[in-house]
């Protein structure tokens, strides 16, 4: 294997701040720091010159001019409004020491320096190439792999014993974390490849193919003399690739092999793995359609693929299934001839659907659409800046405070006002310290916003963090930048403190801050805290868009940085800075959308660039870019296709970004839903139903006269939900949904939710007798919830009135139904309806 040139290592990592770009000086320094350094250098030179003579010598003036030009070049390279990726100077110094020791062939000193980098700074960033940054841990592994034979022998002599002991212990205790520690710290030891192979096997057993494939890639690319057979590695890599939806033969090919391992996959293995890939497409726990009883975030959470269960909605009269949110709101504002997408979107946890309105969080019963609970209204916080002249920024702020997410067994939203009160059980784990803004963390500032956690069943506030006056609170004055994500039973939140963007791991029991990681420095922009930065947590990574020209990947287990890619903020991001009129702001851009993980490809529709970009999940390398054109958002994705919606609807190939098909539709009024092999697009004319595979128009579902166009769509509970600024509507599935519900209700007798759903479907099919029979079969002991009992009685009343109408030719039978209906009527409206019947 090629050995690293120590001089090249020093050159590559000498700058400390950022990688060079296009031959210009290194980027990544704060603007203020650059200007301050420039002015200090200039004043020092001038003072020295004035001490010697009245006029500074020409060479001093030229030196000062050169310094200024260099600093300005740094500013130009950084880009307007881009974040500052923080590169550890200590790790850079140790890297230089290791390179010097390699020059002297002092292997112990070089190895000790590299091991210290991996141990103390493994989660920090180091420059790699171009606009890519890699973790210090990954950099150390790469440099160790490129040591000459004597250097690698010295490394193994020093570390083999410890690595073997840890591997034996982890294997005996089946300790996944312990095995991961061996791979992280001792991959290049004599047992490192064995540990990686075993860990990959365990990860495949747990259906975590992306992480397994990354480990096997490390063995293939970094380990110089593995004794694991090429066939074993090949079949495991191909199995992981198949589970991710890639071609099975991509797991191992001759072109990708290292010398000594050129065996391609046998033909019969390829057939078996192709069958595995086909089965994986629909297997539970793998990337695929949502089960319908949990929709955690805007695109569903997890990999954010936006896939929903198959449903065939019937656009009937929605009066029984309509809940008002804000009657006075304008459902579909029009700007530049196109409809703006509604801000509220639904999330689902168990039997409840939740929506964040303008001032509160509301929970609805998924079956009956009854309002189960609503959180107390938020205090109205006056923005620090006047938004009247900045409607685009007002919309960005609205998106931040309408965001809602389910993480663990809690549902979260952000509150711009109020105050958090911490108890002893919420004690903060981190000691107070000075932040980047020079303030003591934990000072009682009434700034920032609050992260509020609710019980999704009752709407009770469990805890909140931010805007507290508690001494020692590290989150007292932070600004949370998005709803959190759930990782391994804990909650991970993204927030801004001072001039830094951070990730924090919170204990879900009380919101205690367990650990945090500084991600990057933020530019001086008075608007930046009002932008929502939705995260994605999948395959052991947390993907964080900065909204300022960079995408970061963070290890979910340790909150250590894996990689960062600076793709550059485009014209949209620059125009979104302070402007006096609407005309100087961009007319449109991407709607809010988290990163989407499709196999080993990450798709990003960044608000800071008018492009759709694809990144390699393992390295962060940009695979392809394409202009946004007139599209507004990513509707959904699978392993091979990405669907975009805007003025037109299109499907793109995930691997290349090439367009597969495009279809014109009427004006879009909300977010589309991919349900099985059909794409439902909400428009001014109703629901356009397209074939997901080829874009063929299958049908147009018209709404009853007088109804507003559909809004943001969600398929759950054998129905389609539409959410806009004013209302939530439910459209049942009278076709496939009826058959599935009948089968489930037969198998699980006495289930209230299934019985209510079946009764409604029977009523809509014109069979009140079957609906009443299903309701009467419910045991009274199962109707302990007062809301469910009330709704069941209302359904019985509808069934009885329907039966009385059908029995008009038999007065005695009709009177029997009506007498029972009179006994069930409780409200004034019900009594009036019964008396009229």
Image (spheres, grey):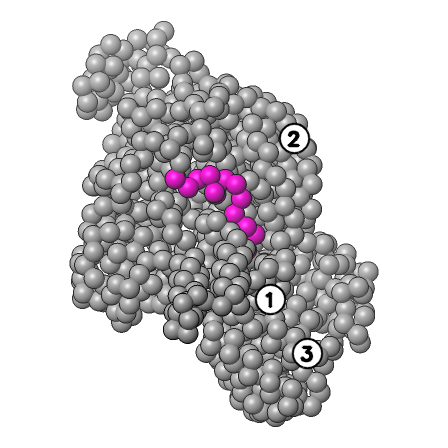
Q: Where is residue 231 in the image (x, y as percent from the top left)?
A: 75, 71
Using the rendered view, name the quadrant where residue 4 is placed: bottom right
Give the residue at x 51% y 61%. Answer: 65
**Residue span colored magenta:** 566-578
Give the residue at x 40% y 24%. Answer: 333
Mark closer to the observer (2, 1): 1
Tag of residue 1: none
Q: In this view, does 455 lie to the left or right of 25?
A: left
Q: Position of residue 13 (x, y in %)?
A: 57, 72
User: Between 552 and 183, which is closer to the camera in this rendering?
Assistant: 552
Using the rendered view, name the quadrant where residue 12 is placed: bottom right
User: Between 167 and 16, which is closer to the camera in this rendering?
Assistant: 16
Q: Is residue 195 magenta?
A: no
Q: Mark 2 points at which residue?
A: 662
Using the rendered view, name the quadrant where residue 492 is placed: bottom left
The answer to whether one can see residue 679 in this image is: no
Q: In which quarter of the image is the C terminus?
A: top left
Give the residue at x 32% y 21%. Answer: 798
Mark 3 crowd level (few <14, some 14–19, many ≥20, 10 Å Cα): some
Q: Mark 1 points at which residue?
A: 128
Give the residue at x 20% y 52%. Answer: 446
Element class at badge 3: loop
């Amino acid at each position: 294997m090629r050995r690293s040139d120590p001089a090249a290592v020093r050159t590559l990592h000498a700058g400390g701040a950022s990688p060079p770009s296009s031959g210009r000086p290194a980027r990544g320094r704060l603007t203020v720091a650059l200007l301050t350094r420039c002015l200090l250098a200039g004043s020092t030179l001038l003072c020295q010159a004035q001490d010697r003579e009245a006029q500074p010598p020409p060479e001093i003036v030229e030196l000062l001019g050169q310094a200024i030009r260099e600093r300005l070049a740094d500013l130009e390279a950084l880009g307007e409004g881009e974040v500052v990726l923080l590169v550890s100077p200590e790790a850079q110094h140790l890297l230089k020491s290791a390179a010097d020791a390699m020059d002297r062939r002092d292997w112990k000193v070089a190895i000790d320096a590299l091991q210290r980098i991996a141990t103390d700074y493994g989660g920090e960033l180091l420059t790699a190439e171009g606009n890519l940054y890699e973790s210090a841990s990954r950099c150390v592994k790469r440099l160790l792999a490129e040591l000459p034979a004597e250097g690698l022998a010295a490394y193994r002599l020093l570390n083999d014993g410890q690595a073997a002991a840890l591997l034996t212990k982890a294997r005996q205790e089946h300790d996944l974390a312990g095995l991961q520690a061996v791979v992280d710290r001792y991959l290049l030891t004599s047992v490192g490849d064995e540990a990686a192979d075993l860990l990959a096997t365990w990860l495949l057993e747990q259906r975590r193919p992306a992480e397994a494939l990354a480990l096997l890639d490390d063995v293939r690319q970094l380990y110089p003399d593995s004794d694991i057979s090429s066939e074993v590695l090949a079949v495991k890599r191909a199995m992981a690739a198949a589970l991710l939806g890639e071609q099975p033969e991509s797991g191992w090919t001759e072109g990708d092999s290292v010398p000594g391992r050129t065996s391609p996959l046998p033909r019969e293995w390829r057939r078996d793995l192709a069958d595995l890939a086909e089965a994986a497409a629909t297997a539970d726990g793998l990337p695929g359609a949502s089960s319908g009883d949990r929709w955690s975030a805007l695109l569903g959470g997890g990999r954010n693929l936006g896939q929903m269960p198959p449903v065939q909605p019937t656009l009937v009269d929605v009066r029984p299934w309509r809940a008002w949110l804000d009657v006075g709101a304008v459902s579909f504002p029009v700007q530049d001839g196109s409809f703006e997408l509604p801000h509220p979107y639904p999330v689902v946890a168990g039997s409840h659907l939740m929506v964040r309105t303008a001032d509160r969080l509301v929970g609805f019963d998924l079956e009956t659409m009854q309002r189960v609970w609503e959180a107390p209204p938020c205090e109205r916080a006056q923005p620090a800046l006047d938004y009247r002249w900045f409607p685009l920024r007002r919309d960005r702020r609205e998106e931040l405070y309408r965001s809602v997410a389910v993480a663990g067994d809690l549902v979260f939203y952000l509150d711009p006002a109020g105050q958090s009160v911490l108890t002893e059980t919420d004690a903060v784990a981190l000691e107070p310290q000075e932040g980047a803004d020079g303030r003591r963390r934990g000072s009682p500032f009434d700034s920032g916003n609050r992260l509020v956690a609710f019980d999704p069943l009752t709407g009770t506030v469990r805890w909140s963090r931010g805007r507290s006056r508690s001494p020692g609170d590290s989150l007292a004055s932070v600004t949370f930048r998005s709803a959190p994500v759930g990782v391994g039973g804990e909650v991970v939140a993204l927030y801004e403190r001072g001039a830094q963007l951070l990730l924090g791991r919170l204990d879900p029991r009380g919101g205690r801050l367990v650990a945090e990681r500084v991600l990057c420095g933020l530019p001086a922009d008075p608007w930046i805290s009002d932008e929502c930065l939705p995260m994605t947590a999948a395959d052991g990574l947390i993907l964080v868009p900065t909204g300022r020209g960079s995408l970061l990947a963070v290890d979910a287990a340790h909150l250590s940085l894996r990689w960062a890619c600076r793709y550059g903020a485009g014209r949209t991001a620059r125009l979104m800075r302070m402007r006096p009129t609407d005309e100087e702001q961009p007319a449109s851009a991407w709607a809010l959308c988290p990163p989407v993980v499709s196999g080993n490809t990450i798709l990003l529709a960044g608000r800071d660039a008018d492009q759709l970009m694809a990144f390699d999940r393992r390295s962060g390398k940009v695979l392809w870019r394409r202009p946004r054109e007139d599209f507004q958002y990513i509707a959904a994705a699978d392993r091979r296709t990405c669907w975009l919606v805007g003025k037109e609807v299109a499907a793109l190939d995930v691997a290349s970004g090439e367009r597969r098909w495009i279809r014109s539709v009427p004006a879009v009024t909300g977010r589309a839903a991919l349900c099985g092999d059909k794409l439902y697009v909400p428009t001014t004319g109703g629901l356009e139903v397209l074939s997901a595979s080829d874009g063929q128009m299958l049908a147009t579902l018209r709404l009853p006269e007088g109804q507003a166009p559909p809004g943001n769509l969600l398929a759950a509970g054998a129905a389609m939900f539409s959410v806009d600024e004013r209302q939530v509507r439910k459209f049942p599935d009278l076709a496939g949904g009826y058959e599935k519900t009948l089968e489930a209700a037969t198998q699980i007798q006495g289930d209230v939710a299934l019985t209510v759903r079946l009764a409604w479907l029977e009523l809509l099919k014109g069979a009140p007798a079957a609906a009443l029979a299903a309701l009467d079969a419910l045991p009274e002991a199962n109707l302990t919830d007062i809301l469910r009992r009330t709704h069941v009685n209302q359904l019985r009343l509808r069934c009885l009135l329907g039966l009385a109408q059908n029995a008009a030719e038999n007065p005695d039978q009709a009177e029997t139904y009506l007498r029972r209906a009179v006994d069930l009527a409780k409200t004034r409206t019900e009594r009036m309806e019964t008396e009229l019947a």
